[in-house]
Image: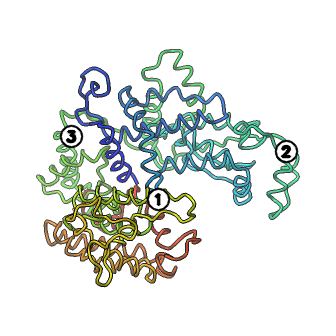
Amino acid sequence: DQSDQLRLLKDVLKEHHIELKGATTAALGGRNNAADIRPITVLNAISVLNTEVAMARSIQTGSDLSDSENKMGKKVRQIATQIRSSFQKAKFSQNSVDFDDLMLLTRELLLRNPEVREILHRRWRHVLVDEFQDTSQIQLDLVRLLTTNSLFIVGDGDQSIYSWRGASPESMSDFEEAFHDRKHGWDGLLEHEIDLTKYLENICRHHAMLSDENRQRSLLKVKTVYLMENYRSTTNIVKAAQRVITASGKSGCSSSDEKTTRSSQDEIRQDMKPMRGTGPSPRVLACKDGKAEANFVVNTVNSMVNSGELTPSSTVAFIYRTNAQSRLLEEACVEQNLRYVVRGSTGTFYKRAEVQDCMCFLKIMYNSRDRSAWARAVRTPSRGIGETSLDEFFRYCDSVTDKFMETPETEISPPTPMDIMLSLAPSGNCKPEDLGMYLPPRNIMSTRSINRFIPFAKSLKSLMEKAAVLSVPELLSTLIDDLDLKSHFDTISKSRDEFQDRLSNVMELIRASDRYSNDGPCVKIFDDEAMSTPLGNFLDDVALIADIDVDESDANDGGRVV
């Protein structure tokens, strides 16, 4: 997820001796002009560069990526270009991919492997894409590669919000260019031509027979249906929104630029038909500063209560643009004794410390090359294993791998970091000098570090043995007890209420894993052919939803500002 990406990015920046906070262009060969750059900005720049590289390798011509220069400053682009390759290698060395990799590698797979395309075309005869306005060029290629002759998309170019990730509001108009009068979805992406009728007959042979209409249709046709009725907002709101949208599309454009803009997005924009009556006119108020704004909002709520327009049990929502804006609103609520609760801020479930503390152990048990997970696990709870000791262990792992690779005739994969860690767990009357079945650790790790890792290795060995027989929820409960994580949560909590809240979150995590309780043991240690495991499936599901904000507010919990 993004936290792992940023942690890895900071490691790569450190290796390249690049300091973002207060960084100077002099450090990069330019003038001494200090300016802070956020790591997430560099991460997004790398995403844009990855897209550029992928599109440059494509046989497709005419792809316009020139506007990527406007998506990042010159300095950001320079840093991203310098570390992009190292960042990609660092991810792959940990057996990990991010969201961009999932798209880029899938696109590459479908471009190069007709057998895989055919399997997916047979599986998915019809494709539906929602929020199409937020697709990037790479995602558009994926849609094209997955589509034969049946595609349905839904979107609104005026609602595009992911331009910083390569999405283009013009994707709605680009859609018609990509599909209209084409022989099939991937027409123009691949060099070789196919007979679509024969291809469809082949992939449809296990389904209903191909219709006469599809047999006779030689080229794809795009049909557009406009949904004009607006049942959500009143007439005044809709009209105000349309004027803002139209004005924002024209702002800062010359007359020639305006014509170009109209030819893409404005030409397909339609006036909405409000269905909820006229309603009150929207108000626009400019306040002196953020504090004045917060006081105005809270005073307005109190005035509505005093006038009887609201009751003390009513719920009112404050909607703000960034999390940082909540501080002044909260202070105003406290000052005026207005009960409130903050939803959807930085405390999303899978981002909470106690949840990640549990998850990091599951991660290293499933993918022990995940060094970010190791960094958290060795400190949960504190074991006296610092950054230096952890670096020594990683160097030890690298040395074991290097020694193993010196014998190329072997068909056995090199030991994983977990295998190496378990080799540090003494058995029987084993002496410290006899530890490490792959390579003596004392030549690389200090005696102090080895002694710190021995009890940790013993704990992990016990957990790995239990993972071979326990279900996912059973393993979670066991590791919490065996590693005494409850004491750790108590230590990091500032109050008893906070500790109870952390425990509730951990119990909720166990309940979230209950769906895998009947899928058998977490891992199959001696089954190298297993394509998936319950533990892997659980971690995959968590990774997909970890960045989604969920509002779990109780509908009956009235009398609050939300």
The three-letter amino acid code for the residue at tag 1 is Leu
Q: Which residue is mark 1?
A: 544
> Looking at the image, is mark 3 or mark 2 earlier in the sequence?
2
Within 10 Å of disc 1 (Cα), the crowding (few <14, some 14-19, many 20+) is few
The three-letter amino acid code for the residue at tag 2 is Asp
Q: Which residue is located at x 32 percent, y 23 percent? A: 29
Q: Which residue is mark 2?
A: 195
Task: Find the distance from the CA under tag 3 to the CA under tag 1.
Answer: 37 Å
Q: Nearer the viewer, residue 415 or 190?
A: 415
> Looking at the image, is mark 3 or mark 1 earlier in the sequence?
3
Q: What SS does tag 2 mark? A: loop
Task: Find the distance from the CA under tag 3 to the CA under tag 2.
Answer: 64 Å
The three-letter amino acid code for the residue at tag 3 is Glu
Q: Which residue is located at x 36 percent, y 72 percent? A: 422
Q: What SS does tag 3 mark? A: helix
Spot occupied by residue 378 in the image (x, y as percentages of width and height): 27, 65
Q: What SS does tag 1 mark? A: helix
